[in-house]
Amino acid sequence: MFFLNLKLVICIFFAISFSAWSDQNSDKINPEIFNIGSQNKNIKLKKERKPIVSDNWMVVTANSQASIVAGKILEKGGTAVDAMISAQLVLGLVEPESSGLGGGAFLVYFDNTKKEVITLDGRETAPLLIKEKIFQDVDGKSLKFFDAVVGGKSVGTPGTPALLEEAYKRWGRTKWSLLFKDAMNLSNNGFIVSKKLNSSIKRSKNSLSKFINTKTYFLPNNVPLKIGDIHINKKYANTLKVFARDGSKVFYDGAIGDDIISTVQKASINAGFLSHKDLLNYKVIERSPVCSKYRDYEVCGMGPPSSGALTISQILGMIENYNISELGPTNPDTWKIIGDASRLAFADRSLYMADSDFINVPINELIDKNYLYERSKFLDSKNKIEIVKAGKLVSKSSSNWSNDISLELPSTSHISIVDIYGNALSMTTTIENGFGSRLMTNGGFLLNNELTDFSFKSFKNGKKIANNIEPGKRPRSSMAPTIILKNNRPVYVLGSPGGSNIIGYVVNAIVSMIDWKNNAQEAASVSHGINKFGTYYLEKNTFISKLAPSLEAMNYKVKLKNFSSGLNIININDRLYGGSDHRREGIAIGN
Ligand code: DON
């Protein structure tokens, strides 16, 4: 079986004939070795990987098949956006549990011609017919998370197809139809089922079995797709053919859109409210990037409806007042500062951050250096801050607390790219939970459950919650595609999946590179300590878990756990250095 898989891997590799590998670490990124490695993931081997190094371009995605296809585009002179589109189309096939054409994404782009950072919001929207109490039972109690996720009610208007087209119109260069070629080949002739896809199917077997299209595809004969299977998705191939020919209109005012609507409205569980009007109204929105200074760098990312860049800027803005670099990563005081800065930022996040088209989000005040300096004074305490409250801002929000309840399953995907023109791209893309709503269209792709990122309740103590459900509103996100500049040039391109832990993952990686001078691979594999609401979660089997007694002595409740971050990072230095999180199946390649 192993040799059969090996043969297939090699065949597929040569079929797409990619030859532009980095000269350094060639043993590490030999495609044959890598592809086998990705299926029989050996964490030790991956942890020992050095950063991939290249001179002209680099791409880091969550799956080798997507990275290879994107690399081919870049090698032929394609732009970062061309490569991203080809990677996203492949990810929708090979990592369907994480992202795809039925989901949404945020794009952060450094345009090297204009020397500016631009952000595009391709987040899903709530249907116009949505009801405020959609995720409550008859007694007004919040539904259990998975009771809300599975079925049509959680599906928001997909934004990814429109985002791909909008990005292409602005920054594409390769012929549009060529971007679809490899994804179509892989759909028609078969892609390799990875270990992650296999284990994700096993984990969600029950919910995937609730819908016939989904079950037939992921569990043929009631058996989860196996690692190394060569799997075909003809329906997805057809979707790609139509998308390549007619553009994203087919999703919003065409046959694929009709199918999306009927899949949602006729869902056998939780029939939903998405309508043609929602699809017709959908718009990708260019928003001002949220940028803030951190030491000698400028950290830029996606503003509301994402809380990602704002919360990261707040955490960094507070810890900037401490010498984390000198304290070092093994000092419990370092983690007290990072953990409590994170708790303070999450308090503000809960109160003030949501879709800024619906509520006033005081963006400038939240990342104001004086405000963060005052907030950082709380971090002077010897032990953990006992009571964490949101800061008082001049522009009051009428909102109230709402903590995240979304569970972190290995869903969502991050793409980092630098092209030969010096453009840099950071995109986090998602269908929310693993396999989203579990509804699969007749077009061979899954629909998101992004609406469960809203607060299930609209009011608390008589006050409106910022992230309440409203027609047309975009649910608050934690996704944090990030580009970090120094002297107005991009130096780090990064992001991660992980639900609301994304914020901590990205902060840890940034601190690892900027304060602890680690390289892109070390930062992607950085050991995690995450504290959002009081309990300190320390990553099992890493040096950080040994800090538990010291942190407990500071009054923290401590829990050890595994994390499933998927940091994909490029450092633009004398050369390009790429790193990919050992916890998932990502791979950096370059030439
Ligand atoms: O937008 C968000 O913040 C979430 N829907 C992302 C979900 C996610 O990252 C799940 N990952 N493990």
Image (cartoon, rainbow, N blue to C red):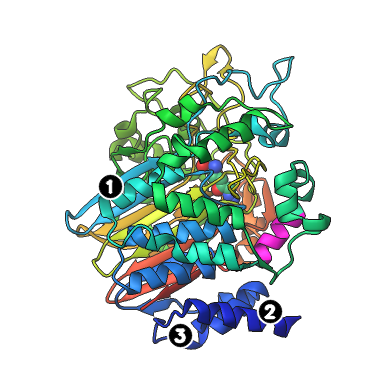
Kindly identify the amino acid type of the residue bearing the numbered disc 1: Ile
Residue 354 position within the rendered picture, expressed as x and y whole percent measured from the top left: 45, 30
User: Which quarter of the frame holds ligand 1?
Assistant: top right
Name which of mark 1 and mark 3 comes first in the sequence.
3
6, above or below 321, in the image = below
**Residue ID at (46%, 31%):** 279
Residue 262 position within the rendered picture, expressed as x and y whole percent measured from the top left: 61, 32
Q: Can the viewer see residue 293?
A: no
Residue 122 position within the rendered picture, expressed as x and y whole percent measured from the top left: 41, 41
| Residue 515: quadrant of the picture | bottom left
Q: Can the viewer see residue 438?
A: yes
Give the side of residue 477 with respect to residue 304, left or right: right
- Secondary structure beneath dot 1 equals strand
Kindly identify the amino acid type of the residue bearing the numbered disc 2: Asn
- Which quadrant of the rendered structure holds the N terminus? bottom right
| Residue 229: quadrant of the picture | bottom right
Give the side of residue 138 with respect to residue 176, left or right: right
In the foreground, 272 or 493: 272
137, above or below 561, in the image = above
Q: Which mark is residue 118?
A: 1
- Secondary structure beneath dot 2 equals helix
212, above or below 456, in the image = below
Name which of mark 1 and mark 2 comes first in the sequence.
2
- Spatial separation of the CA atoms under disc 1 and disc 2: 42 Å
Which residue lies under the disc numbered 3? 25
Residue 284 position within the rendered picture, expressed as x and y whole percent measured from the top left: 36, 38
What segment is highlighted magenta in the picture? 195-202
Which residue lies under the disc numbered 2? 5
